Every structure is written in structure tokens, then in C-alpha cells.
Amino acid sequence: MISIERPGQGNLEIEFVLLDFDGTLANDRRVHPKAKDKINLLSKRTKIYIFVNPPISPFDKIDPSAPPFNKGGKGGILLKELIEERLRKVKAEIVYLPEGDSSRRKLDLLRQLGPTRCVAIGNGVDDAAMIHEAGIGICIISKEGSSAEAMKNADLVFADILDALDFLLKPLRQKTTLSK
């Protein structure tokens, strides 16, 4: 559990981190090695969920060298295998979501876990509701950009995932940023 001190607002006891994969944790399907290390540190104190909602089935073959999620036909690998390889040794539960229904499913899991016990991190339109309802909602801008709706709904905005994960790992940053 992470205790987040919010002077003037009351503390939050965070047990879960809900994290979007594409554009948030990963850029062009690649995850920074330091992000993996930071997630593993967080996983000692919280349960981590990573949402993957590709525009194709996780069981379609793709060309890993092509732009994100282009089907690769016979010579490609399964998208699910690629995602799992990229998240190898990351202590998190991978949740595959169908296209078109991801926003509702993210929100359903958040509500099931208890919004005030969760940090939600994302960058897209489909993350906006989850970011809004979470105890702490974080928007990541990153190289892929961010939706205005996700930014508007966020409690905090960071330029990249490493800064957001550091925020959760370093209590002094929390106190300074969240003071009223």
C-alpha cells in the first residue's frame, strides 16, 4: 500500500495502480527498461494492472518491425506474444480489452476495486473516465501526445511515465505537488 499525503485534503491509501499500455507505458510498443524497474518496485506495495486495448485481436499476427499493430500475415508473431515479451519480468496483471469497449471496462475494474484505493494512469480518450474517478488520476503526455479530455480529468499531468512512477515512489514529491 502507498499512503499519499494530501495536505488539506486527507490522505489516500493506494492499493492498486491501473496503467494504460499504448502511449502511456509504451511508445511504439516499446517499454523503457527503467519503467519496468519502477513498476516492479511499485508492485511490492500495490497491485498493478496494465490495460492493453489494441485495434486488432491479441491473437492476430503482426509484423513487429512495422508501425503499431499492422497485421503481418504468415511471417508475423501474435500480438499477445509481443506484448507479453515486452512486459516480461514486469510484476503486473495484463488485461486485454476489446476495441470500442475499453473505456467502460477500465471504469468497471476501477469501481470494483474502489476508486479511492486506485491511481489511474493514461493518456487517451478511453482513459479519461478512469482518470477522473480514481483517487489520483494521472495523465501522461509522452511522445504520442494526450487527449484533451484525459488532461482535463487528471489530478496530475506528467511529460513521461518515468516521472509519474517516480511521483508514486517518492513521498516528498507527493506532498509538494498535492498541497492546497
Image (tube, grey):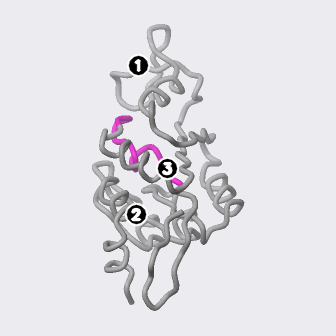
User: Which SS class for mark 1?
Assistant: loop
Residue 136 disc label: none
> Is 76 drawn above or below residue 10 in the view shown?
above
Label 1 belongs to which residue?
63
Residue 43 disc label: 3
Q: Where is residue 113? Give x, y as percent.
A: 67, 60
User: Looking at the image, is mark 3 or mark 1 nearer the viewer?
Assistant: 3
Residue lying farthest to the top in this orientation = 74
Whether residue 158 is in magenta: the answer is: no
Q: Where is residue 38? Give x, y as percent.
A: 37, 49
> At 58% from the left edge and 61% from the top edge, which residue is drawn?
15
Sort mark 1 into few (<14), some (14-19) or many (20+) by Cα contacts within 10 Å: some
> At 34% from the left edge and 41% from the top edge, which residue is drawn?
27
User: Which SS class for mark 3?
Assistant: loop
Q: Amino acid at mark 2?
A: Leu
Label 2 belongs to which residue?
168
- Please report whichever mark, 2 or 1, sits nearer to the chain's N-terminal start: 1
* Residue range highlighted in magenta: 18-30
> At 35% from the left edge and 46% from the top edge, which residue is drawn?
35
- Label 3, label 1: how many angstroms apart (C-alpha)? 31 Å
Q: Is residue 34 left or right of residue 15?
A: left
Q: Where is residue 118? Give x, y as percent.
A: 57, 64
Q: Where is residue 55? Give x, y as percent.
A: 53, 36
